[in-house]
Image (cartoon, rainbow, N blue to C red):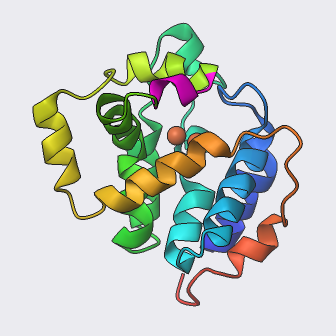
């Protein structure tokens, strides 16, 4: 099966679920993330990363709200591994690091925690809470840390219950022809 076929199944069918989100379903969250990246003038790879940053939620079998049951689903690693088989690191690495970027931002920006939605606050605890100073320094030195931080800011903004976006086809057109 092609990557496009897989993504249509994951985003258009499975992403009806809320998967821990409170205000929007995963498809809306994915499309709003991609649109915010597009509006910010980001590259096609980054827009794909934004579209697919939570694909790991659709790939695991832990149910729709593992965080509510005290389980960290590790969706950033599940999603990044899946993406790394299909795209380059400019797509998979910001996805792998987007949870770490939240832990980084909470540790380094005094007002960031107050901006988090309820679902992000709940999952933050399970994901290890704010980074220590040493963890934050190590994170900031990673090659894709900046992209992960930009992605994480988009992630938090992409939960608008009234958001209007292009459909999935608009973003799948950004995929390299080779996948
Ligand atoms: Fe996520
Ligand atoms: Fe997200």
Placement of 127 over or under 138, stated as above or below: above
Residue found at x 38% / y 28%:
110
Placement of 124 over or under 43, stated as above or below: above
Q: Position of residue 106 (x, y in %)?
A: 37, 30
Q: Position of residue 25 (x, y in %)?
A: 78, 37
Range of residues picked out in magenta: 112-117
- Identify which residue, 158 or 172, lies in the foreground: 158
Furthest-top residue in view?
A: 69
- For the N terminus, the quadrant is bottom right
Residue 27 lies in the magenta stretch: no
Residue 114 lies in the magenta stretch: yes
Displayed quadrant of residue 134? top left
Furthest-left residue in view?
A: 134
Furthest-bottom residue in view?
A: 177
Q: Position of residue 77 (x, y in %)?
A: 38, 44
Q: Where is residue 105 in the image (x, y as percent from the top left)?
A: 37, 37
- For the C terminus, the quadrant is bottom right
**Number of callouts in the render?**
0
Displayed quadrant of residue 36? bottom right
| 164 left or right of 145 in image | right
Residue found at x 74% / y 31%:
18
Q: Is residue 55 visible?
A: no
| 48 left or right of 95 in image | right
- Identify which residue, 42 or 170, lies in the foreground: 42
Residue found at x 78% / y 66%:
168
| 154 left or right of 131 in image | right
- Identify which residue, 162 or 112, lies in the foreground: 112
Residue found at x 71% / y 82%:
173
């Amino acid at each position: 099966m092609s990557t496009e076929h897989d993504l249509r199944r994951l985003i258009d069918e499975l992403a009806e679920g809320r998967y821990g989100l409170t205000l929007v379903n995963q498809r809306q969250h994915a499309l709003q993330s991609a649109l915010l990246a597009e509006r910010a003038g980001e590259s096609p790879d980054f827009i794909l990363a934004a579209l697919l940053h939570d694909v790991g939620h659709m790939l695991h079998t832990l149910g729709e709200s593992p965080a509510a049951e005290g389980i960290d689903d590790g969706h950033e690693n599940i999603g990044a591994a899946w993406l790394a088989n299909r795209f380059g690191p400019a797509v998979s690495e910001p996805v792998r690091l987007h949870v770490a970027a939240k832990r980084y931002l909470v540790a380094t920006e005094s007002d960031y925690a107050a901006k988090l939605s309820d679902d992000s606050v709940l999952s933050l605890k399970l994901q290890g809470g704010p980074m220590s100073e040493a963890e934050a320094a190590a994170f900031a030195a990673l090659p894709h840390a900046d992209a992960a931080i930009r992605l994480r800011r988009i992630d938090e903004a992409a939960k608008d219950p009234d958001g209007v976006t292009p459909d999935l086809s608009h973003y799948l057109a950004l995929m390299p022809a080779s996948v």
